[in-house]
Image (cartoon, helix red, strand yellow):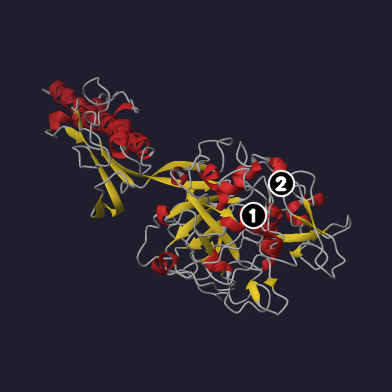
Amino acid sequence: MASALKRINRFRKEQGGAVAATYALALVPLIAMAGLGYDYARMAGMDSELQNGADQAALAAATQLDGKDGACARAGNAAIGLVSNSTLLADGGGALSVGTAITVANDQCGVFADIRFFDEYESRTNFTLATTDEDANYVEVTLDGRRVTYSLVAVAGVANADGVALAVAGLGSAICKVPPVMMCNPNEGTDPEFIVANYVGKGIRLIANVNGKNGGGDDADEVAGSYGPGVFGFLETNAGPGAIDTARTLGRQALPGNCVALDGADVKPGQQVSVLDALNTRFGIYENGLNNVCGTNDALCPAAANSRIDLVRSASNGASCRVSSQGFQVGERPYRPTSPTDDLTDSSNIQPMGYPRDKCHAVSLAGVCSGNGNARVGDGNWDRTAYYATNNYSGTVTPSDVAAQTYGYPELENRTLPTRYQQYRWEAANPSLLAPKNISNPPGNNVDFKQQGTPLCTAAGQVPAGSTPDRRVLSIAIINCTAEGLGANTTDADIEKFVDVFLVEPTARRVAPDGTKYTNNSDVYVEVIGATTVGGGGTAGQQVRKDVPYLIE
Protein backbone atom coordinates (compact mmCIF):
# COMPACT_ATOMS: atom_id res chain seq x y z
CA MET A 1 0.00 0.00 0.00
CA ALA A 2 2.80 2.33 0.93
CA SER A 3 4.55 1.54 -2.31
CA ALA A 4 1.44 2.43 -4.28
CA LEU A 5 1.09 5.74 -2.47
CA LYS A 6 4.72 6.56 -3.20
CA ARG A 7 4.18 5.92 -6.91
CA ILE A 8 1.07 8.11 -6.89
CA ASN A 9 2.88 10.96 -5.11
CA ARG A 10 5.88 10.67 -7.47
CA PHE A 11 3.52 10.78 -10.48
CA ARG A 12 1.72 13.77 -8.99
CA LYS A 13 4.99 15.65 -8.53
CA GLU A 14 6.48 14.61 -11.86
CA GLN A 15 6.84 17.64 -14.32
CA GLY A 16 8.23 15.92 -17.37
CA GLY A 17 5.98 16.22 -20.51
CA ALA A 18 4.00 19.21 -19.22
CA VAL A 19 4.76 21.30 -22.34
CA ALA A 20 3.35 18.59 -24.57
CA ALA A 21 0.02 18.94 -22.88
CA THR A 22 0.12 22.70 -23.36
CA TYR A 23 0.85 22.29 -27.06
CA ALA A 24 -1.94 19.76 -27.34
CA LEU A 25 -4.37 22.26 -25.87
CA ALA A 26 -3.06 25.17 -28.06
CA LEU A 27 -2.77 23.22 -31.29
CA VAL A 28 -6.20 24.08 -32.66
CA PRO A 29 -5.97 27.89 -32.21
CA LEU A 30 -2.38 27.91 -33.51
CA ILE A 31 -3.43 26.11 -36.68
CA ALA A 32 -6.37 28.51 -37.04
CA MET A 33 -4.08 31.56 -36.68
CA ALA A 34 -1.57 30.25 -39.21
CA GLY A 35 -4.34 29.49 -41.65
CA LEU A 36 -5.83 32.94 -41.15
CA GLY A 37 -2.47 34.56 -41.91
CA TYR A 38 -1.94 32.44 -44.99
CA ASP A 39 -5.40 33.02 -46.36
CA TYR A 40 -5.31 36.73 -45.50
CA ALA A 41 -2.05 37.06 -47.44
CA ARG A 42 -3.72 35.42 -50.43
CA MET A 43 -6.71 37.74 -50.11
CA ALA A 44 -4.48 40.85 -49.85
CA GLY A 45 -2.43 39.68 -52.82
CA MET A 46 -5.57 39.18 -54.87
CA ASP A 47 -6.77 42.65 -53.91
CA SER A 48 -3.43 44.11 -55.06
CA GLU A 49 -3.64 42.17 -58.32
CA LEU A 50 -7.13 43.43 -58.97
CA GLN A 51 -6.37 47.05 -58.08
CA ASN A 52 -3.18 47.12 -60.13
CA GLY A 53 -5.09 45.69 -63.06
CA ALA A 54 -7.86 48.26 -62.66
CA ASP A 55 -5.32 51.09 -62.35
CA GLN A 56 -3.46 50.06 -65.48
CA ALA A 57 -6.65 49.52 -67.44
CA ALA A 58 -7.97 52.96 -66.43
CA LEU A 59 -4.68 54.64 -67.33
CA ALA A 60 -4.63 52.87 -70.69
CA ALA A 61 -8.19 54.01 -71.34
CA ALA A 62 -7.47 57.61 -70.30
CA THR A 63 -4.75 57.96 -72.93
CA GLN A 64 -7.45 57.79 -75.61
CA LEU A 65 -9.65 60.58 -74.23
CA ASP A 66 -8.65 63.17 -76.82
CA GLY A 67 -12.16 64.49 -77.48
CA LYS A 68 -12.19 63.24 -81.05
CA ASP A 69 -14.68 60.90 -82.69
CA GLY A 70 -14.35 57.36 -81.44
CA ALA A 71 -12.56 58.36 -78.21
CA CYS A 72 -14.85 56.33 -75.96
CA ALA A 73 -14.65 53.22 -78.13
CA ARG A 74 -10.86 53.49 -78.34
CA ALA A 75 -10.62 54.05 -74.59
CA GLY A 76 -12.79 51.03 -73.82
CA ASN A 77 -10.88 48.77 -76.14
CA ALA A 78 -7.58 50.05 -74.74
CA ALA A 79 -8.70 49.08 -71.25
CA ILE A 80 -9.55 45.62 -72.52
CA GLY A 81 -6.76 44.95 -74.96
CA LEU A 82 -3.71 46.91 -73.89
CA VAL A 83 -3.48 45.57 -70.32
CA SER A 84 -2.74 41.90 -69.65
CA ASN A 85 -2.32 40.90 -66.03
CA SER A 86 -2.28 37.18 -65.22
CA THR A 87 -4.03 36.06 -62.07
CA LEU A 88 -1.73 34.26 -59.65
CA LEU A 89 -3.46 34.24 -56.29
CA ALA A 90 -7.16 34.04 -57.05
CA ASP A 91 -9.00 30.94 -58.14
CA GLY A 92 -8.65 30.16 -61.81
CA GLY A 93 -5.73 30.82 -64.10
CA GLY A 94 -7.13 33.36 -66.53
CA ALA A 95 -6.12 36.97 -67.02
CA LEU A 96 -7.92 39.81 -65.31
CA SER A 97 -10.85 40.87 -67.43
CA VAL A 98 -12.55 44.19 -68.07
CA GLY A 99 -15.24 42.79 -70.29
CA THR A 100 -15.72 42.41 -74.01
CA ALA A 101 -14.55 44.73 -76.78
CA ILE A 102 -16.52 47.92 -77.15
CA THR A 103 -17.97 48.88 -80.49
CA VAL A 104 -19.85 52.14 -80.53
CA ALA A 105 -20.70 54.67 -83.23
CA ASN A 106 -18.47 57.73 -83.59
CA ASP A 107 -19.23 60.61 -81.25
CA GLN A 108 -21.25 58.36 -78.94
CA CYS A 109 -20.12 57.68 -75.42
CA GLY A 110 -22.44 55.27 -73.66
CA VAL A 111 -22.38 53.38 -70.37
CA PHE A 112 -20.96 49.88 -70.50
CA ALA A 113 -21.01 47.04 -68.02
CA ASP A 114 -17.54 47.65 -66.61
CA ILE A 115 -16.57 51.05 -68.02
CA ARG A 116 -18.13 54.47 -67.53
CA PHE A 117 -17.12 57.87 -68.92
CA PHE A 118 -17.59 61.16 -67.12
CA ASP A 119 -17.79 64.76 -68.22
CA GLU A 120 -17.16 65.91 -64.65
CA TYR A 121 -16.02 63.83 -61.69
CA GLU A 122 -15.71 64.88 -58.05
CA SER A 123 -16.34 61.60 -56.23
CA ARG A 124 -18.17 58.31 -56.62
CA THR A 125 -21.38 60.03 -55.64
CA ASN A 126 -20.83 63.37 -57.36
CA PHE A 127 -20.28 63.14 -61.12
CA THR A 128 -21.77 63.89 -64.52
CA LEU A 129 -21.79 61.12 -67.09
CA ALA A 130 -20.40 61.92 -70.56
CA THR A 131 -22.69 61.45 -73.53
CA THR A 132 -20.30 62.22 -76.39
CA ASP A 133 -16.66 61.60 -77.19
CA GLU A 134 -15.92 65.29 -76.82
CA ASP A 135 -17.32 65.34 -73.28
CA ALA A 136 -15.45 62.27 -72.05
CA ASN A 137 -12.82 63.66 -69.68
CA TYR A 138 -12.57 60.80 -67.18
CA VAL A 139 -12.98 57.04 -67.31
CA GLU A 140 -13.94 54.53 -64.63
CA VAL A 141 -12.93 50.87 -65.00
CA THR A 142 -14.27 48.05 -62.84
CA LEU A 143 -12.55 44.68 -63.06
CA ASP A 144 -14.58 41.51 -63.13
CA GLY A 145 -14.74 40.03 -59.60
CA ARG A 146 -12.39 37.19 -58.55
CA ARG A 147 -12.68 34.77 -55.60
CA VAL A 148 -10.23 33.36 -53.10
CA THR A 149 -11.33 29.99 -51.64
CA TYR A 150 -9.92 29.77 -48.15
CA SER A 151 -7.74 26.77 -47.43
CA LEU A 152 -7.51 26.55 -43.64
CA VAL A 153 -9.80 29.24 -42.28
CA ALA A 154 -12.77 27.52 -43.87
CA VAL A 155 -12.85 25.07 -40.95
CA ALA A 156 -13.89 28.01 -38.80
CA GLY A 157 -16.88 28.64 -41.04
CA VAL A 158 -15.49 31.84 -42.61
CA ALA A 159 -16.96 32.55 -46.05
CA ASN A 160 -14.77 32.67 -49.15
CA ALA A 161 -13.56 36.18 -50.19
CA ASP A 162 -14.74 37.94 -53.35
CA GLY A 163 -12.62 40.78 -54.71
CA VAL A 164 -13.72 43.74 -56.87
CA ALA A 165 -11.45 46.61 -58.03
CA LEU A 166 -12.36 50.02 -59.43
CA ALA A 167 -10.18 52.86 -60.74
CA VAL A 168 -10.88 56.30 -62.17
CA ALA A 169 -8.38 58.10 -64.39
CA GLY A 170 -8.15 61.28 -66.40
CA LEU A 171 -5.78 62.79 -68.94
CA GLY A 172 -3.60 65.74 -68.07
CA SER A 173 -2.52 67.67 -71.16
CA ALA A 174 -0.13 70.49 -71.90
CA ILE A 175 0.82 72.43 -75.01
CA CYS A 176 4.55 72.98 -75.34
CA LYS A 177 6.80 74.97 -77.69
CA VAL A 178 4.35 77.88 -77.77
CA PRO A 179 4.69 81.38 -76.30
CA PRO A 180 2.34 81.51 -73.30
CA VAL A 181 -0.15 84.07 -74.62
CA MET A 182 -3.84 84.04 -73.68
CA MET A 183 -6.80 86.01 -74.97
CA CYS A 184 -10.19 86.57 -73.40
CA ASN A 185 -12.92 85.24 -75.67
CA PRO A 186 -14.04 88.41 -77.50
CA ASN A 187 -17.65 87.26 -77.68
CA GLU A 188 -18.02 84.99 -74.69
CA GLY A 189 -21.70 85.74 -74.15
CA THR A 190 -22.93 84.32 -77.46
CA ASP A 191 -19.98 82.18 -78.54
CA PRO A 192 -18.58 80.58 -75.36
CA GLU A 193 -16.94 77.77 -77.33
CA PHE A 194 -15.13 80.23 -79.62
CA ILE A 195 -16.10 78.60 -82.90
CA VAL A 196 -12.93 79.16 -84.90
CA ALA A 197 -14.69 79.21 -88.28
CA ASN A 198 -16.44 82.44 -87.23
CA TYR A 199 -13.10 84.25 -86.87
CA VAL A 200 -10.82 82.93 -89.61
CA GLY A 201 -9.20 85.78 -91.58
CA LYS A 202 -10.49 88.45 -89.21
CA GLY A 203 -8.19 90.84 -87.42
CA ILE A 204 -8.39 91.17 -83.65
CA ARG A 205 -7.00 94.11 -81.72
CA LEU A 206 -5.69 92.68 -78.47
CA ILE A 207 -5.43 95.07 -75.55
CA ALA A 208 -2.98 94.49 -72.70
CA ASN A 209 -4.09 93.95 -69.14
CA VAL A 210 -1.25 95.67 -67.36
CA ASN A 211 -2.48 95.32 -63.78
CA GLY A 212 -2.95 99.00 -63.12
CA LYS A 213 -0.03 100.21 -65.26
CA ASN A 214 -0.43 101.34 -68.82
CA GLY A 215 2.04 100.33 -71.43
CA GLY A 216 3.53 103.65 -72.32
CA GLY A 217 2.08 106.40 -70.21
CA ASP A 218 -0.76 107.66 -72.39
CA ASP A 219 -2.67 104.60 -73.60
CA ALA A 220 -5.95 105.49 -71.96
CA ASP A 221 -7.95 102.60 -73.39
CA GLU A 222 -5.70 99.90 -72.00
CA VAL A 223 -7.40 97.77 -69.38
CA ALA A 224 -6.00 98.35 -65.92
CA GLY A 225 -6.16 95.22 -63.83
CA SER A 226 -9.27 93.63 -65.35
CA TYR A 227 -10.02 91.12 -68.05
CA GLY A 228 -12.69 91.55 -70.68
CA PRO A 229 -13.43 90.63 -74.30
CA GLY A 230 -10.30 90.91 -76.43
CA VAL A 231 -7.94 91.53 -73.52
CA PHE A 232 -4.74 89.53 -73.59
CA GLY A 233 -2.29 88.41 -70.97
CA PHE A 234 0.18 85.62 -70.36
CA LEU A 235 0.20 82.18 -68.81
CA GLU A 236 2.58 80.88 -66.20
CA THR A 237 4.87 78.17 -67.54
CA ASN A 238 7.69 76.06 -66.22
CA ALA A 239 10.10 78.56 -67.79
CA GLY A 240 9.64 80.82 -64.74
CA PRO A 241 7.24 83.49 -63.44
CA GLY A 242 9.19 86.70 -64.02
CA ALA A 243 9.04 89.30 -66.78
CA ILE A 244 12.40 88.16 -68.19
CA ASP A 245 11.15 84.57 -68.30
CA THR A 246 8.03 85.68 -70.18
CA ALA A 247 10.10 87.77 -72.57
CA ARG A 248 12.26 84.77 -73.35
CA THR A 249 9.25 82.65 -74.25
CA LEU A 250 7.98 85.47 -76.48
CA GLY A 251 11.23 86.23 -78.25
CA ARG A 252 13.44 83.18 -78.44
CA GLN A 253 13.33 80.69 -81.28
CA ALA A 254 14.24 77.80 -78.94
CA LEU A 255 11.70 78.21 -76.19
CA PRO A 256 13.09 77.56 -72.70
CA GLY A 257 10.93 74.74 -71.37
CA ASN A 258 7.50 76.26 -71.67
CA CYS A 259 4.51 73.96 -71.27
CA VAL A 260 1.02 75.27 -70.57
CA ALA A 261 -1.53 72.98 -68.94
CA LEU A 262 -4.80 72.73 -70.84
CA ASP A 263 -6.75 72.30 -67.63
CA GLY A 264 -6.01 74.65 -64.79
CA ALA A 265 -3.73 77.24 -66.42
CA ASP A 266 -2.33 80.04 -64.28
CA VAL A 267 -2.83 83.53 -65.71
CA LYS A 268 -0.78 86.64 -65.08
CA PRO A 269 -1.47 90.15 -66.38
CA GLY A 270 0.06 91.62 -69.51
CA GLN A 271 3.58 92.75 -68.80
CA GLN A 272 5.07 96.14 -69.58
CA VAL A 273 5.92 97.09 -73.13
CA SER A 274 9.49 95.93 -72.47
CA VAL A 275 8.13 92.37 -72.58
CA LEU A 276 6.39 93.06 -75.87
CA ASP A 277 9.72 94.28 -77.23
CA ALA A 278 10.72 90.62 -77.25
CA LEU A 279 7.71 89.89 -79.44
CA ASN A 280 8.90 92.53 -81.92
CA THR A 281 12.11 90.60 -82.55
CA ARG A 282 10.00 88.29 -84.69
CA PHE A 283 9.69 91.24 -87.10
CA GLY A 284 13.41 92.04 -87.02
CA ILE A 285 13.07 94.94 -84.57
CA TYR A 286 15.48 94.92 -81.63
CA GLU A 287 15.10 97.38 -78.79
CA ASN A 288 17.87 98.00 -76.27
CA GLY A 289 18.07 95.83 -73.19
CA LEU A 290 17.34 92.46 -74.79
CA ASN A 291 20.67 90.82 -73.93
CA ASN A 292 19.12 88.78 -71.11
CA VAL A 293 16.39 87.66 -73.47
CA CYS A 294 18.07 87.19 -76.84
CA GLY A 295 21.72 86.70 -75.99
CA THR A 296 24.74 88.22 -77.66
CA ASN A 297 23.89 90.08 -80.87
CA ASP A 298 20.27 88.97 -80.41
CA ALA A 299 21.22 85.61 -81.93
CA LEU A 300 18.60 83.67 -79.95
CA CYS A 301 15.74 85.78 -81.36
CA PRO A 302 15.87 85.61 -85.17
CA ALA A 303 13.38 87.48 -87.30
CA ALA A 304 10.99 85.80 -89.68
CA ALA A 305 12.41 85.49 -93.18
CA ASN A 306 9.37 87.44 -94.33
CA SER A 307 9.50 90.49 -92.09
CA ARG A 308 7.27 92.74 -94.14
CA ILE A 309 5.79 95.44 -91.92
CA ASP A 310 4.34 98.93 -92.28
CA LEU A 311 7.36 100.74 -90.77
CA VAL A 312 10.39 102.15 -92.57
CA ARG A 313 14.00 102.34 -91.49
CA SER A 314 16.72 104.76 -92.43
CA ALA A 315 18.88 103.49 -95.29
CA SER A 316 21.98 104.56 -93.37
CA ASN A 317 24.25 101.67 -92.39
CA GLY A 318 24.38 102.97 -88.85
CA ALA A 319 20.62 103.22 -88.43
CA SER A 320 19.12 101.96 -85.23
CA CYS A 321 17.18 98.70 -85.08
CA ARG A 322 14.78 100.16 -82.53
CA VAL A 323 11.40 101.78 -83.04
CA SER A 324 12.53 105.41 -82.85
CA SER A 325 13.16 108.49 -84.94
CA GLN A 326 16.56 107.05 -85.83
CA GLY A 327 15.36 103.51 -86.50
CA PHE A 328 12.05 101.95 -87.50
CA GLN A 329 9.35 104.57 -87.75
CA VAL A 330 6.10 105.50 -89.42
CA GLY A 331 6.76 106.49 -93.04
CA GLU A 332 5.92 109.79 -94.65
CA ARG A 333 3.01 108.27 -96.55
CA PRO A 334 1.47 105.50 -94.45
CA TYR A 335 -1.68 103.60 -95.31
CA ARG A 336 -4.50 105.59 -93.73
CA PRO A 337 -8.04 104.87 -95.00
CA THR A 338 -10.72 107.29 -93.92
CA SER A 339 -13.63 104.87 -94.30
CA PRO A 340 -14.13 101.10 -94.01
CA THR A 341 -15.29 101.16 -97.63
CA ASP A 342 -12.14 102.82 -99.01
CA ASP A 343 -10.00 101.01 -101.57
CA LEU A 344 -6.85 103.12 -101.97
CA THR A 345 -5.54 102.40 -105.44
CA ASP A 346 -3.00 105.25 -105.76
CA SER A 347 0.12 103.43 -104.68
CA SER A 348 2.22 106.60 -104.89
CA ASN A 349 0.44 107.80 -101.77
CA ILE A 350 1.26 104.66 -99.73
CA GLN A 351 4.85 103.97 -98.76
CA PRO A 352 5.40 101.47 -97.35
CA MET A 353 2.46 99.10 -97.18
CA GLY A 354 2.85 96.20 -94.84
CA TYR A 355 0.05 93.81 -94.06
CA PRO A 356 -2.67 96.22 -93.03
CA ARG A 357 -5.31 95.99 -90.35
CA ASP A 358 -8.90 95.34 -91.34
CA LYS A 359 -10.16 98.60 -92.82
CA CYS A 360 -12.66 99.04 -90.00
CA HIS A 361 -9.71 98.94 -87.57
CA ALA A 362 -7.31 100.99 -89.70
CA VAL A 363 -9.43 104.16 -89.78
CA SER A 364 -8.72 105.12 -86.17
CA LEU A 365 -7.26 103.98 -82.86
CA ALA A 366 -10.41 102.23 -81.61
CA GLY A 367 -11.77 101.53 -85.11
CA VAL A 368 -15.39 101.14 -86.10
CA CYS A 369 -15.55 97.34 -86.23
CA SER A 370 -18.26 95.16 -84.78
CA GLY A 371 -17.14 91.72 -85.91
CA ASN A 372 -18.84 88.93 -83.96
CA GLY A 373 -20.48 91.53 -81.77
CA ASN A 374 -17.26 93.06 -80.45
CA ALA A 375 -15.49 96.23 -81.59
CA ARG A 376 -12.09 94.59 -81.22
CA VAL A 377 -12.92 91.93 -83.82
CA GLY A 378 -12.68 92.96 -87.47
CA ASP A 379 -14.54 91.66 -90.50
CA GLY A 380 -11.56 90.30 -92.48
CA ASN A 381 -11.91 93.01 -95.12
CA TRP A 382 -8.36 94.30 -95.47
CA ASP A 383 -7.40 96.46 -98.43
CA ARG A 384 -6.08 93.91 -100.90
CA THR A 385 -6.49 96.35 -103.78
CA ALA A 386 -4.13 98.87 -102.23
CA TYR A 387 -1.73 96.16 -101.13
CA TYR A 388 -1.40 94.61 -104.57
CA ALA A 389 -1.07 97.98 -106.28
CA THR A 390 1.51 99.28 -103.81
CA ASN A 391 3.67 96.16 -104.02
CA ASN A 392 3.35 95.92 -107.82
CA TYR A 393 1.76 92.49 -107.84
CA SER A 394 -0.78 93.29 -110.54
CA GLY A 395 -0.39 90.84 -113.38
CA THR A 396 2.17 88.79 -111.41
CA VAL A 397 -0.29 86.96 -109.25
CA THR A 398 -3.97 87.30 -108.50
CA PRO A 399 -5.58 87.20 -105.07
CA SER A 400 -7.40 84.02 -106.04
CA ASP A 401 -4.04 82.33 -106.73
CA VAL A 402 -2.88 83.13 -103.21
CA ALA A 403 -6.24 82.20 -101.66
CA ALA A 404 -5.95 78.69 -103.10
CA GLN A 405 -3.09 77.86 -100.71
CA THR A 406 -4.13 76.39 -97.35
CA TYR A 407 -0.70 75.68 -95.77
CA GLY A 408 -2.14 72.81 -93.76
CA TYR A 409 -5.12 74.68 -92.29
CA PRO A 410 -8.49 73.21 -93.33
CA GLU A 411 -10.15 76.48 -92.28
CA LEU A 412 -8.44 78.20 -95.23
CA GLU A 413 -10.01 75.94 -97.86
CA ASN A 414 -12.40 77.28 -100.52
CA ARG A 415 -11.54 80.94 -100.05
CA THR A 416 -11.82 83.38 -102.94
CA LEU A 417 -9.78 86.16 -101.30
CA PRO A 418 -6.54 85.55 -99.40
CA THR A 419 -6.02 86.15 -95.72
CA ARG A 420 -2.95 88.10 -94.68
CA TYR A 421 -1.40 84.86 -93.48
CA GLN A 422 -1.85 83.29 -96.93
CA GLN A 423 -0.30 86.38 -98.51
CA TYR A 424 2.60 86.21 -96.06
CA ARG A 425 3.26 82.55 -96.78
CA TRP A 426 3.00 83.04 -100.55
CA GLU A 427 5.56 85.85 -100.40
CA ALA A 428 7.84 83.77 -98.17
CA ALA A 429 7.81 81.10 -100.88
CA ASN A 430 8.84 83.78 -103.40
CA PRO A 431 11.74 85.49 -101.59
CA SER A 432 12.74 87.65 -104.55
CA LEU A 433 9.65 89.73 -103.78
CA LEU A 434 10.92 90.46 -100.28
CA ALA A 435 14.19 92.22 -101.08
CA PRO A 436 14.34 95.52 -99.13
CA LYS A 437 13.37 98.43 -101.31
CA ASN A 438 14.60 102.00 -101.19
CA ILE A 439 11.78 104.48 -100.81
CA SER A 440 11.97 107.74 -102.72
CA ASN A 441 12.04 110.86 -100.60
CA PRO A 442 8.97 113.03 -100.41
CA PRO A 443 9.62 116.66 -101.30
CA GLY A 444 11.66 118.42 -98.65
CA ASN A 445 12.84 115.23 -96.93
CA ASN A 446 16.55 114.51 -97.02
CA VAL A 447 16.42 111.09 -95.36
CA ASP A 448 16.54 107.90 -97.40
CA PHE A 449 14.40 105.02 -96.16
CA LYS A 450 14.10 101.33 -96.80
CA GLN A 451 10.97 99.24 -96.74
CA GLN A 452 11.03 96.08 -94.70
CA GLY A 453 10.83 92.75 -96.54
CA THR A 454 13.68 90.51 -95.62
CA PRO A 455 15.16 91.45 -92.23
CA LEU A 456 17.13 94.70 -92.23
CA CYS A 457 18.94 94.17 -88.93
CA THR A 458 19.97 90.55 -89.32
CA ALA A 459 21.58 88.65 -92.16
CA ALA A 460 18.80 86.10 -92.55
CA GLY A 461 15.50 85.15 -91.05
CA GLN A 462 13.62 82.06 -89.99
CA VAL A 463 11.85 80.36 -92.90
CA PRO A 464 8.17 79.61 -92.11
CA ALA A 465 6.99 76.10 -91.29
CA GLY A 466 9.31 73.12 -91.57
CA SER A 467 10.60 71.57 -88.38
CA THR A 468 10.71 74.84 -86.43
CA PRO A 469 7.84 77.12 -85.44
CA ASP A 470 6.85 79.98 -87.73
CA ARG A 471 8.10 83.19 -86.16
CA ARG A 472 4.99 85.16 -87.10
CA VAL A 473 2.50 82.60 -85.86
CA LEU A 474 1.41 82.30 -82.25
CA SER A 475 -0.75 79.60 -80.70
CA ILE A 476 -2.79 81.46 -78.10
CA ALA A 477 -5.14 80.16 -75.42
CA ILE A 478 -8.78 81.24 -75.51
CA ILE A 479 -10.31 81.68 -72.03
CA ASN A 480 -13.84 82.66 -71.07
CA CYS A 481 -12.61 85.34 -68.71
CA THR A 482 -16.00 86.39 -67.35
CA ALA A 483 -17.09 82.85 -66.54
CA GLU A 484 -13.70 82.12 -64.99
CA GLY A 485 -13.81 85.34 -62.98
CA LEU A 486 -10.31 86.20 -64.13
CA GLY A 487 -8.31 88.71 -62.19
CA ALA A 488 -4.64 89.43 -61.75
CA ASN A 489 -2.67 86.23 -61.25
CA THR A 490 -5.67 83.91 -61.51
CA THR A 491 -4.91 80.20 -61.09
CA ASP A 492 -6.58 77.08 -62.50
CA ALA A 493 -8.35 78.80 -65.39
CA ASP A 494 -9.90 76.46 -67.96
CA ILE A 495 -8.59 76.93 -71.49
CA GLU A 496 -11.38 76.63 -74.05
CA LYS A 497 -9.00 75.89 -76.92
CA PHE A 498 -5.78 76.97 -78.60
CA VAL A 499 -5.99 79.02 -81.80
CA ASP A 500 -3.22 79.90 -84.26
CA VAL A 501 -2.96 83.59 -85.10
CA PHE A 502 -0.77 85.56 -87.51
CA LEU A 503 1.15 88.56 -86.15
CA VAL A 504 0.09 91.28 -88.58
CA GLU A 505 2.27 94.16 -87.38
CA PRO A 506 4.81 94.97 -84.67
CA THR A 507 3.71 96.73 -81.52
CA ALA A 508 4.43 100.43 -81.91
CA ARG A 509 2.84 103.80 -81.25
CA ARG A 510 1.74 105.14 -84.63
CA VAL A 511 0.98 108.84 -84.53
CA ALA A 512 0.11 111.13 -87.44
CA PRO A 513 1.81 114.55 -87.83
CA ASP A 514 -1.33 116.22 -86.50
CA GLY A 515 -1.08 114.16 -83.30
CA THR A 516 -3.78 111.63 -84.17
CA LYS A 517 -2.84 108.27 -82.69
CA TYR A 518 -3.62 105.14 -84.68
CA THR A 519 -2.09 102.43 -82.49
CA ASN A 520 -0.79 102.06 -78.94
CA ASN A 521 2.62 100.62 -78.32
CA SER A 522 0.99 97.86 -76.30
CA ASP A 523 -1.54 96.74 -78.92
CA VAL A 524 -1.01 93.31 -80.43
CA TYR A 525 -2.85 93.01 -83.74
CA VAL A 526 -3.41 89.49 -84.99
CA GLU A 527 -5.37 87.62 -87.64
CA VAL A 528 -6.99 84.28 -86.82
CA ILE A 529 -5.64 81.47 -89.01
CA GLY A 530 -7.35 78.38 -87.64
CA ALA A 531 -7.50 75.92 -84.79
CA THR A 532 -4.17 74.85 -83.37
CA THR A 533 -3.18 71.48 -84.80
CA VAL A 534 -1.44 69.52 -82.11
CA GLY A 535 1.81 67.90 -83.12
CA GLY A 536 3.31 64.73 -81.75
CA GLY A 537 7.04 65.30 -81.50
CA GLY A 538 9.89 67.76 -81.48
CA THR A 539 9.94 68.10 -85.28
CA ALA A 540 6.20 67.99 -85.82
CA GLY A 541 5.78 71.68 -86.50
CA GLN A 542 4.30 74.58 -84.65
CA GLN A 543 3.74 72.96 -81.28
CA VAL A 544 3.83 69.74 -79.29
CA ARG A 545 1.19 68.38 -76.96
CA LYS A 546 2.10 66.24 -73.99
CA ASP A 547 -0.60 63.99 -72.57
CA VAL A 548 -0.06 62.26 -69.23
CA PRO A 549 -2.76 59.97 -67.80
CA TYR A 550 -3.23 60.14 -64.06
CA LEU A 551 -5.24 58.25 -61.46
CA ILE A 552 -7.96 60.00 -59.49
CA GLU A 553 -8.90 57.04 -57.30
Q: Residue 457 location in percent, x, y?
A: 80, 52
Give the residue type at disc 1.
Answer: Ala
Residue 434, numbered circle = 2
Judge from the rendering whether residue 438 lies leftward or rightward of residue 207; answer left or right.
Answer: right
Identify the secondary structure beneath mark 2.
helix
- Residues 392 and 81: in front is 392
| Quadrant of the image containing the N terminus | top left
Q: Contact (CB < 8 A) between labels 1 and 2?
A: no
Q: Quadrant of the rendered structure where residue 45 is?
A: top left
The vertical placement of 51 against 518, above or below, is above
Mark 1 / mark 2, whichever is N-terminal: 1
Judge from the rendering whether residue 130 lies leftward or rightward of residue 387; answer left or right.
Answer: left
- Residues 106 and 379: in front is 379
Tell me the mark number nearer the camera, choosing from 1 and 2: 1
- What residue would you read off at disc 1? 389
Report crowding for label 2: few under 14, some 14 to 19, many 20 or more residues within 10 A (C-alpha). many
Q: Residue 360 location in percent, x, y?
A: 52, 68
- Residues 116 and 151: in front is 116
The vertical placement of 405 against 496, above or below, is above
- Residues 421 and 440: in front is 440
Q: Residue 285 location in percent, x, y?
A: 74, 57
Identify the secondary structure beneath mark 1.
helix
Inter-mark Cα distance, 1 to 2: 15 Å
